[in-house]
C-alpha cells in the first residue's frame, strides 16, 4: 500500500458509479448538539463521510449539521442503518423513509443505507433488503448494503436480491478481530468493507505492541490503528465527539506502516475472542 493515501481518497462501490470516502466519522453514542458540532468539526477538518443509524438516535442531529455546513450536499457522504423490520413490508419501507426524511428532508437522499444487523432471521433480512432495494429504485439512497453479516448471510441473499452483491459490509475490524473469512469473501466479490470500532474503543491503548509501534512512528496509538485500517483497504469509522481528537484521527497521511509492522499487527488477531461487539466469521 502506497504512502500516497490522502484524506480525499474514495473507493468505488460495486456495480454503481458511487464512490465512498475512505475515512469516515462514526457518531455512535453522541447525542444532541454535541453530535451536530462533532459532525461540523469533522467536515471542517476534511472528512466527507458521516456514519449514523436509527439505533444511534442522532440522525436528525447529523442532518442539522448538513443544513449548517456550507458544503454542497453532493460533497458529503452520509450513511444510516435500520436494525429490524417494522412488521410488514410497507411499514419497514416507511421506517426507512423516515430516516432519510430526518437527515435530508422529504426531497433528499442518503448515500448509503445499511441493514444494521443479521439477527432478524431469514424472513426479516429479506424484508429489510427488499425495502432498501425499493428505496434505491426511488432514488432516496445512492447505494445499499449490510452490517454484521457473515458469508452465509450474504450468500442467502442471492435467492431474492435484485441488487447483489450488497455494496458494503460494515463489520467490527481491528488487529485483535480481523474476521479474515468474511473479509476474504467480501474482497473476492468486490464488496467494500467498512471497519467499525477501529480504535477498539480505546481498550488497547496500553497494549505494549501497539504502544511500541506508535512510539516508532511518532504517532498516537489511535493514528496507528486508523492507518492500519486504511492500508488494509478497509473504510475505518473512528468515533469521537472531541474536535481535537477528530482532527488527530485524520492526521494519518504523513506516514506508512511498513509491511513487516503490518504483519506484527496482523499477528495480534484473536479471532472471535477479540471482538468487543460482534464477530460474524463462522467457525
Image (cartoon, rainbow, N blue to C red):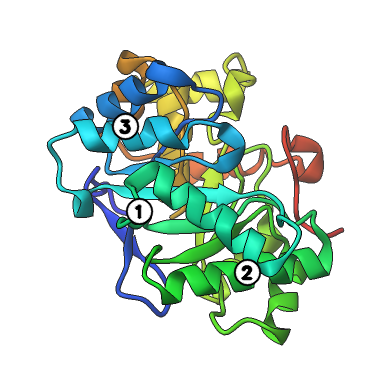
Residue drawn at point x = 58 percent, y = 20 percent: 202
Residue drawn at point x = 46 percent, y = 43 percent: 236
Residue drawn at point x = 32 percent, y = 68 percent: 18
Can you identify the residue that label 1 sits on?
106
Q: Position of residue 59 (x, y in %)?
A: 46, 37
Q: Quadrant of residue 10?
A: bottom left
- On screen, residue 129 versus residue 46, left or right, reads right
Rendered image: mark on residue 129: 2
* Structural crowding at the residue carrying mark 3, measured as other residues with C-alpha within 10 Å and reported as few (<14), some (14–19) or many (≥20): many
Tell which circle, 1 or 3, labels the residue nearer the N-terminal end. 3
Marks 1/3: CA distance? 14 Å
Residue in front for this viewpoint, 236 or 110:
110
Can you identify the residue that label 3 sits on?
64
Quarter the N terminus occupies? bottom left
Of labels 1 and 3, the one closer to you: 1
In the displayed image of the protein, which residue is found farthest to the right?
283
Whether residue 253 appears in this view of the structure is no
- In the image, is residue 157 above or below residue 98? below
* Structural crowding at the residue carrying mark 2, measured as other residues with C-alpha within 10 Å and reported as few (<14), some (14–19) or many (≥20): many
Q: Position of residue 124 (x, y in %)?
A: 77, 64
Marks 1/2: CA distance? 21 Å
Q: Quadrant of residue 224?
A: top left
Q: Position of residue 201 (x, y in %)?
A: 59, 24
Residue drawn at point x = 71 percent, y = 57 percent: 85
Marks 3/2: CA distance? 27 Å
- In the image, is residue 250 above or below residue 38? below
Mark 3 secondary-structure assignment: helix
- In the rendered picture of this protein, how many numbered marks are placed on residues? 3
Tell which circle, 3 or 2, labels the residue nearer the N-terminal end. 3
Amino acid at each position: 500500500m502506497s504512502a500516497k493515501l490522502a484524506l480525499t481518497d474514495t473507493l468505488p462501490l460495486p456495480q454503481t458509479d458511487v464512490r465512498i470516502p475512505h475515512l469516515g466519522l462514526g457518531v455512535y453514542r453522541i447525542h444532541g448538539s454535541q453530535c451536530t458540532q462533532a459532525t461540523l468539526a469533522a467536515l471542517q477538518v476534511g472528512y466527507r463521510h458521516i456514519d449514523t443509524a436509527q439505533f444511534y438516535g442522532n440522525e436528525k442531529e447529523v442532518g442539522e449539521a448538513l443544513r449548517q455546513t456550507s458544503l454542497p450536499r453532493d460533497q458529503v457522504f452520509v450513511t444510516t442503518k435500520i436494525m429490524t423490520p417494522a412488521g410488514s413490508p410497507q411499514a419497514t419501507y416507511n421506517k426507512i423513509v423516515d430516516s432519510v426524511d430526518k437527515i435530508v428532508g422529504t426531497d433528499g437522499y442518503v448515500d448509503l443505507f445499511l441493514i444494521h444487523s443479521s439477527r432478524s432471521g431469514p424472513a426479516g433480512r429479506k424484508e429489510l433488503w427488499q425495502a432498501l432495494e425499493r428505496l434505491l429504485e426511488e432514488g432516496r439512497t445512492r447505494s445499499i448494503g449490510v452490517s454484521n453479516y457473515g458469508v452465509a448471510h450474504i450468500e442467502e441473499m442471492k435467492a431474492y436480491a435484485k441488487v447483489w452483491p450488497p455494496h458494503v459490509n460494515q463489520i467490527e475490524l481491528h488487529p485483535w478481530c480481523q474476521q479474515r473469512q468474511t473479509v476474504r469473501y467480501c474482497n473476492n466479490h468486490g464488496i467494500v468493507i467498512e471497519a467499525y470500532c477501529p480504535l477498539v474503543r480505546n481498550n488497547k491503548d496500553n497494549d505494549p505492541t501497539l504502544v511500541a509501534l506508535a512510539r516508532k512512528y511518532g504517532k498516537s496509538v489511535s493514528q496507528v490503528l486508523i492507518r492500519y485500517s486504511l492500508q488494509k483497504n478497509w473504510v475505518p469509522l473512528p468515533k469521537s465527539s472531541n474536535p481535537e481528537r477528530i482532527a488527530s484521527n485524520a492526521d494519518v497521511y504523513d506516514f506508512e506502516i511498513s509491511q513487516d509492522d503490518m504483519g506484527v499487527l496482523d499477528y495480534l488477531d484473536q479471532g472471535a475472542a477479540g471482538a468487543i461487539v460482534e464477530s460474524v466469521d463462522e467457525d
